Structure formats: structure tokens, C-alpha cells
Image (cartoon, helix red, strand yellow):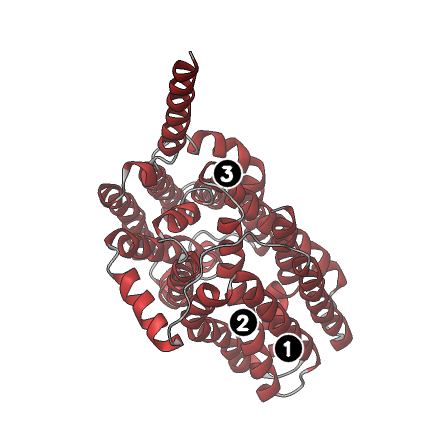
């Protein structure tokens, strides 16, 4: 598990080097224009949507570790070639390889966490993963910002080379992992196994409802961070670019500071109620955003409210990380965690692709409707979470009940043995 967490931190650190500067690199440094830069960002999303349906089947049949190693090598080649690419075609092909590799890493690493954890340690394991991912992205972005020079192609080549090196270092680290023997589905043709597993997943009403809920979560929060909400802040609230950077930093700081404090609260609460509470917190965040852009306070008050919006989103994220991913794992039948993780990652990618497309234009031009729309989405999260709770078993919604029953059964067996010996 320690190696897996190191792997999460390394991959996030590598991504932090390049992701914030990708648009500038393609459009300005390589001189390929805004259209090509936009296509590169679209290719990332399309590549993920193409490979994720097959990733789940591969994880189920081959195990998460071989799939992860393949994804890492693919991403490393994509990153290195992206740093060397000089034409639009080369940039797009490189972005497709990098995007596909990154997309497959997520469910593979999540499945490895599931296989290496028990029910009682799973929430903490996923919380640690989320904490290290955000820390790695933040540190990587900070260092990358000091290394990059918009007038020098070689500085960007260095950034992408460092990213590729992080992925290859992760290959070395992961190659030393010895995974526990997890159930695998075999003895059937690949296509039939894939169709059967997807049919089985779609028949799981709780998982389907969780996927719908997950789509709304990612669409209303993550899909707005760097598009609609930032455009709204600049256009409606009049915040400066430095204030926007402060807001993003406040989001990361809230996650890093609050993650393990929140974990103690979350571990003893119903998962469905925790997700419902996140919807209410995010509704308050959108109210703060509304005040920032539509209120009549001073510019300082507007900026403070806008920064508070990002901080409140971070609090909700910290509550979700030990809740949603373990729930996906607990809903999966034995040996099917990879399929379920990939399906949920696919839903996430769809939301992240559609979120900016819808939120960006609204945040820039339709300020009032934008805030009201996503305020309603946040309240919808609460409603969907309460509905989901009705589909979950007692142990799925309250995992500590399973631990209590195991302890109780163990105590009963021990007392029975003592009576027998007596």
C-alpha cells in the first residue's frame, strides 16, 4: 500500500509539471494556435472515453498491475513525444497517448488499493490517495512554474521529460509490488466477458444510481473549476488573475489541511448522508459565488467570497474522497472491482468533458442563471444521495457495522470454545 501511495504522489507530481502550461505550450510556444491547443484538450477527454470501457475488462481479466504498467509506459512515451513534437499532427497523437495512459492509471491504481485494503482500512487508504494527489499536483505545478520559460521551447521539453521520468520511475516502483491473489474472471472469450460484465453492472441499481450521482458531482464541481467558475469570477466578480490563483490555492490548502480531520468524522457516518451533506456545503459555496458576482459589496468582499467558494468546494472534496471510491469497491461483486472502477472513471471523464463546455459560456455571459443552475445541481446531489441510501445495504452505507459483526461473532465463538473446554 505504501508503494501504491508513492505511485499516486509521483504520477500527480508529474502531471502538475505540465497540465497548467499545456495550452500556452501548444498555442504560443509551438506557435500552433488556439484551435490546436483546444483540440489537444479535447483529445485528452476523447482518448479517455475510448480506452476506459476496455480498461475495466483488462483489469478484471489480467489484474490491475499489468494494466497499470502498460498505461505508465504509454503515458511516458506520450509525454516525451509531446515535449519534442513540432507539428499539429504530432502534438495531437502525443496528447492521445498521454491522455489514454493517464485515464487508465486511475481505475488501475484504485483497484490495487481495493485489493490491498480491507473494509476497515479502505476509507483511510482512499483519503490518503486523494491527499497525496493534491499535494503532488500542487508541488509539481509550483516547481514547474519556476522552471518554465514561455520564450524557450527547451524549458517545456524539460518539463515533459521530467513528467515522462516520473511515470518511468513509477514503473520501477510498481514493478516491485506483489499483489495479493484477487479473484479473476477467466475461461471465456474477451468479448463475451466484457458484455456480461457490463450487463451485470447495469443491472446493479445501486451502482447505476451512484454513477448518476457521480456524474452530477463531477459536472457541478470539478467540471467548473478551470472553466465556468473562473470565467464567472473574472467577468462577474471582477477578481484578478492573482486572486483566482489564491482561490485555487485555498482549495488545495483546504484539502491538505482538512483531509484527515474530516476522515475521523466521516468514518462513523452513513456514506449516503455524507454525500448529501456535501451537496448542502456546495450549495452554500454557490451562494457565496453569487454574492461575489451579483452582490453590491466592495471588491475586497467579492474577492473574499470568491476565495471562500473554492475553499468550501475543497471541504466537500475532502469528505467525498474517503466515501465515494470505497463505496464503488463495496458495490462491486467479487473480482469485478476493476470493471466498476473503470465505469465510474468513465462517468467522471464524461462529466469533466461536458462540464466546461456547458459552464464556460454560462459563467462568462449568463451570470445569474449560471449560479442558480449549479446551486440547483448541488441541491440535486443531496436528493440523489438520499435516494441512493435507500438502495444500499446496511453494511454498504455503514461499513463499520460489518466490523462490529465480525468482532461480535469472534467473541461469540471464543466464549463457546471456553464453555466447551470447561
Q: Nearer the viewer, mark 1 or mark 2?
A: 2
Give the x, y percent position of residue 128.
56, 43
What numbered label is drawn on residue 99? 2
Helix, strand or loop at mark 3: helix
Q: Nearer the viewer, mark 3 or mark 1?
A: 3
Location of the C terminus by quadrant is top left
Snapshot quadrant of residue 193: bottom left
Residue sitting nearer the eye, 209 or 236: 209
What numbered label is drawn on residue 28? 1
Binning the other alpha carbons within 10 Å of mark 3 as few (below 14), some (14 to 19) or many (20 upward) gives few
What numbered label is drawn on residue 121? 3
Binning the other alpha carbons within 10 Å of mark 1 as few (below 14), some (14 to 19) or many (20 upward) gives some
Relative to 163, is 381 above or below?
above
- For marks 1 and 2, give the CA distance: 21 Å
Give the x, y percent position of residue 412.
37, 21
| Dots 3, 2 in contact, CB < 8 A | no
Helix, strand or loop at mark 2: helix
Residue ID at (51%, 73%)? 44
| Dots 3, 1 in contact, CB < 8 A | no
- For marks 3 and 1, give the CA distance: 47 Å
Mark positioned earlier in the residue sequence (3 or 1): 1
Relative to 85, is 382 above or below?
above
Residue ID at (59%, 86%)? 88
Residue found at the far front of this picture: 421
Residue ID at (49%, 44%)? 314
Snapshot quadrant of residue 370: bottom left
Binning the other alpha carbons within 10 Å of mark 2 as few (below 14), some (14 to 19) or many (20 upward) gives many
Residue sitting nearer the eye, 145 or 59: 59
User: Would you say 185 lies left or right of 110 here?
Assistant: left
User: Would you say 216 lies left or right of 237 here?
Assistant: left
Mark positioned earlier in the residue sequence (1 or 2): 1
Q: Nearer the viewer, mark 3 or mark 2?
A: 3
Amino acid at each position: 500500500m505504501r508503494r501504491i501511495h508513492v505511485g499516486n504522489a509521483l504520477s500527480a507530481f508529474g502531471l502538475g509539471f505540465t497540465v497548467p502550461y499545456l495550452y500556452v505550450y501548444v498555442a504560443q510556444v509551438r506557435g500552433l494556435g488556439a484551435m490546436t491547443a483546444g483540440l489537444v484538450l479535447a483529445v485528452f477527454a476523447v482518448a479517455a472515453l475510448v480506452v476506459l470501457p476496455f480498461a475495466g475488462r483488462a483489469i478484471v481479466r489480467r489484474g490491475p498491475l499489468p494494466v497499470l504498467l502498460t498505461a505508465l509506459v504509454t503515458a511516458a512515451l506520450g509525454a516525451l513525444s509531446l515535449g519534442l513534437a513540432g507539428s499539429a499532427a504530432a502534438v495531437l497523437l502525443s496528447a492521445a497517448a498521454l491522455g489514454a495512459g493517464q485515464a487508465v492509471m486511475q481505475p488501475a491504481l484504485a483497484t490495487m488499493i481495493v485489493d490491498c485494503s480491507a473494509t476497515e482500512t479502505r476509507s483511510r487508504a482512499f483519503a490518503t490517495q486523494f491527499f497525496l494527489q493534491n499535494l503532488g499536483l500542487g508541488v509539481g505545478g509550483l516547481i514547474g512554474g519556476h522552471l518554465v520559460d514561455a520564450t524557450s521551447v527547451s524549458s517545456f521539453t524539460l518539463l515533459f521529460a521530467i513528467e515522462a521520468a516520473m511515470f518511468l520511475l513509477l514503473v520501477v516502483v510498481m514493478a516491485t509490488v506483489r499483489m495479493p491473489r484477487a479473484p479473476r474472471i477467466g475461461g471465456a472469450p474477451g468479448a463475451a466477458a466484457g458484455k456480461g460484465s457490463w450487463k451485470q453492472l447495469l443491472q446493479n441499481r445501486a451502482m447505476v444510481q451512484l454513477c448518476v450521482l457521480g456524474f452530477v458531482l463531477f459536472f457541478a464541481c470539478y467540471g467548473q473549476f478551470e472553466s465556468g467558475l473562473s470565467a464567472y469570477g473574472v467577468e462577474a466578480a471582477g477578481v484578478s488573475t492573482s486572486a483566482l490563483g489564491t482561490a485555487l490555492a485555498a482549495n488545495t490548502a483546504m484539502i491538505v489541511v482538512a483531509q484527515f480531520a474530516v476522515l475521523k468524522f466521516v468514518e462513523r457516518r452513513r456514506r449516503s448522508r455524507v454525500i448529501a451533506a456535501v451537496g448542502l456545503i456546495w450549495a452554500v459555496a454557490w451562494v457565496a459565488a453569487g454574492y461575489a458576482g451579483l452582490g453590491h459589496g466592495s471588491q475586497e468582499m467579492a474577492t473574499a467570497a470568491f476565495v471562500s467558494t473554492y475553499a468550501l468546494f475543497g471541504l466537500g472534496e475532502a469528505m467525498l474522497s474517503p466515501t465515494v471510491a470505497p463505496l464503488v469497491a463495496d458495490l462491486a461483486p467479487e473480482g469485478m472491482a476493476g470493471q466498476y472502477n473503470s465505469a465510474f472513471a468513465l462517468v467522471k471523464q464524461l462529466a469533466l468533458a461536458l462540464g466546461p463546455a456547458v459552464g464556460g459560456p454560462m459563467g462568462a455571459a449568463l451570470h445569474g442563471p449560471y449560479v442558480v443552475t449549479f446551486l440547483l445541481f448541488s441541491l440535486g446531489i443531496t436528493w440523489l444521495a438520499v435516494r441512493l441510501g435507500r438502495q444500499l445495504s446496511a453494511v454498504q452505507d455503514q461499513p463499520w457495522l460489518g466490523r462490529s459483526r465480525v468482532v461480535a461473532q469472534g467473541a461469540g465463538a471464543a466464549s463457546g470454545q471456553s464453555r466447551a473446554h470447561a
